[in-house]
Amino acid sequence: MRGKTVLVLGADGYLGWATSLHLSKHGHEVVAVDSLVRREWDRQCGTQSLVPIRSMPQRIKRWQAVSGRSISWRKLDLRDAAAVHRLIEEFQPDALVHFAEQRSAPFSMVDLQHAALTQVNNLVGTLNLLFAMRDHAPKAHLIKLGTMGEYGTPNIDIEEGFINITHNGRQARLPYPMQPGSFYHLSKLHDSHNIQFVCRIWGLRATDLHQGVVYGCQTDEVSQHPGLATRFDYDAIWGTVLNRFCVQAAVGQPLTVYGKGGQTRGFLDIRDTVACIRLALDNPAAEGEYRVFNQFTEQFSVKALAELVRDARSTHGLSTSIAHLPNPRVESEEHYYNAKHQKLLDLGLQPHFLGDTLIESVIQTVEKHAARVDPVELEQPNVDWRKGGSAGWRKPVEKTLTPVSVVSPGAKKSRRKSPEDSARPQARLVQSR
């Protein structure tokens, strides 16, 4: 199959970087695009990746040395409509993989400024992209990262994007009813509506990947050199629940389950994420088609995940406790959840399943970088869905983020060394065998 020219938008992120390498290895000409704002948000929030990550130029140089393949790099903000049009016109891509959005639900629920930043960043950037595709690359295939969180937790089976309805004796196939759980998830739903609309009106083609929670930080490509590492987030703003549990276990803290722990979601290995992107790329949507793939491989409740981590460690004689905290989110803590995810399997996805070996490997990654763990980050959730950010957040400071003037996110107090830090007992690392 002929290699395609693919723009990976949000290429500096957790999934964007791994996807860029994966597509490059499989013979595609990759253009990596990012504004680097995620690194700025880390500085503002006082957070950092557990695994150190290099700059984009360093990463790309290392990939060329390791693989002999080149990736083009462009720093660009999708909110800059003129720059987006120039980008699409210059490269005339066959496909665009769109990760370039603010992706944290807690971040979006801190206050008005964070909610507005999330929706402006995500919706305006995607609209700019859609108009640029219409004008300069109308045959290109948009592969957009959505989220299973768009659906919420309905008391019926979750279909893949559409549902057949019978009403007053008439039938129709309609978009599945959505009940997003945060301003972030709402922004993803608005994206889905906008993309579906332009496919119908302009004849664009798009695949909307409603993705579950991703775990792991190793792919075949990333693992080739430490300089190719992708992010590992574990804090309450950017981290996922499984990452948090593995870090808590490694440093000897209880695994903190929010509420009853019956919240059930879809999960998948990062290796399956990059494979799903490639499958969608190799099997594009038709002209005018908007299609939805539910992208996950297994379903787990939060409590079940905590028990998996606890049991994996107990096989090595290591004790891990589970603590239930008041839930800062507004969500059902016990509910029916059965989501379909057949379409990617039909295209040939061969899933990696979550097992004790993988959990242990994640914990080992944590232990390798244990000196970078901030135990304070793990103690309590710091964003309440009803009240917003906790006292740990500074008052927002006005800042201009070109080309749209917005109020920048409030930053959590830095956890860098201070006189108080030096007096704080350090968390004891619990070694697994």
Image (tube, helix red, strand yellow):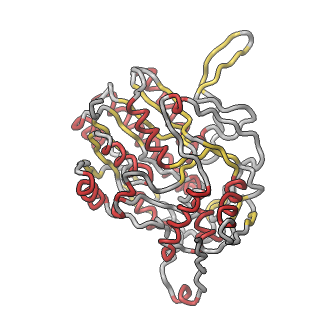
The residue closer to the viewer here, 345 or 92, is 345
Residue 159 locus on image (x, y percent): 63, 29
- Looking at the image, residue 345 sits to the left or right of residue 241; the answer is left
Residue in the image at 43% along x and 29% along y = 206
Tell me, yes or no, if residue 376 can be seen here: no
The residue closer to the viewer here, 24 or 234, is 24
- Relative to 406, is 207 above or below? above
Residue 31 locus on image (x, y percent): 28, 44
Q: Quadrant of the C terminus?
A: bottom right
Residue 61 locus on image (x, y percent): 24, 58
- Which image quadrant for residue 237? bottom right
Residue 271 locus on image (x, y percent): 47, 47
Residue in the image at 70% along x and 50% along y = 301
- Looking at the image, residue 6 sits to the left or right of residue 161; the answer is left
- Relative to 351, is 430 above or below? below
- Looking at the image, residue 156 sits to the left or right of residue 227; the answer is right
